[in-house]
Image (cartoon, helix red, strand yellow):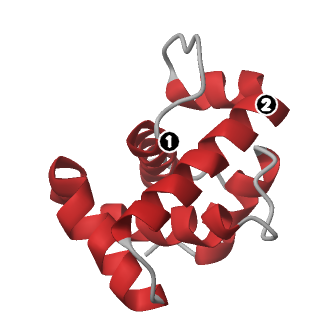
Amino acid sequence: MLSPSIVYEELRLLGVTPHYKGCRQTALAIELVLQNEDSLNHITKMVYQALANQIGCSPASVERNIRTAAHVAWKINPSRLKELAGYPLSAAPSALELITILSSHLQRAQSAPTSL
């Protein structure tokens, strides 16, 4: 299992700090996706709704806060975001794209062999 601190550190490197509501919500969304990759296909029902229930807001608020996190990351560290994506980005990613980019990156990093 991936440590939540690794997710938060990656968000921090992108400029998404804990004072943004979207920081925690993005981290929680990534954790849900890493637990069940299929949830990316049903992002609104399986991720946004689950997070909304957990933190007491609407799914639209969750999506908006994650979208804000994506815009912050794009504004502060677009080169890192492009590097993590592995494909050209010409604008800030959507909320779904940010979750996909970060969960894919963290999944690759977690499965990479460690050298001694």
Vertical arrangement, residue 44 with respect to residue 70, above or below: below
Question: Residue 32 at what x, y percent from top left?
Answer: 35, 70
Q: Quadrant of the N terminus?
A: bottom left
Residue at mark 2: 75
Quarter residue 43 falls in? bottom left
Q: Earlier in the sequence, mark 2 or mark 1?
A: 2
Residue at mark 1: 98
Residue at horizontal 16%, vertical 55%?
42
CA neighbours of label 1 inside 10 A, class few (<14), some (14 to 19), many (20+):
many
Q: Amino acid at mark 2?
A: Lys
Find the distance from the CA under tag 2 to the CA under tag 1: 13 Å
Quarter residue 16 falls in? bottom right
Vertical arrangement, residue 62 with respect to residue 64, above or below: below
| SS class, disc 1 | helix
Question: Residue 7 at what x, y percent from top left?
Answer: 61, 63
Q: Is residue 62 left or right of residue 50?
A: right
Q: Is residue 97 left or right of residue 102?
A: left
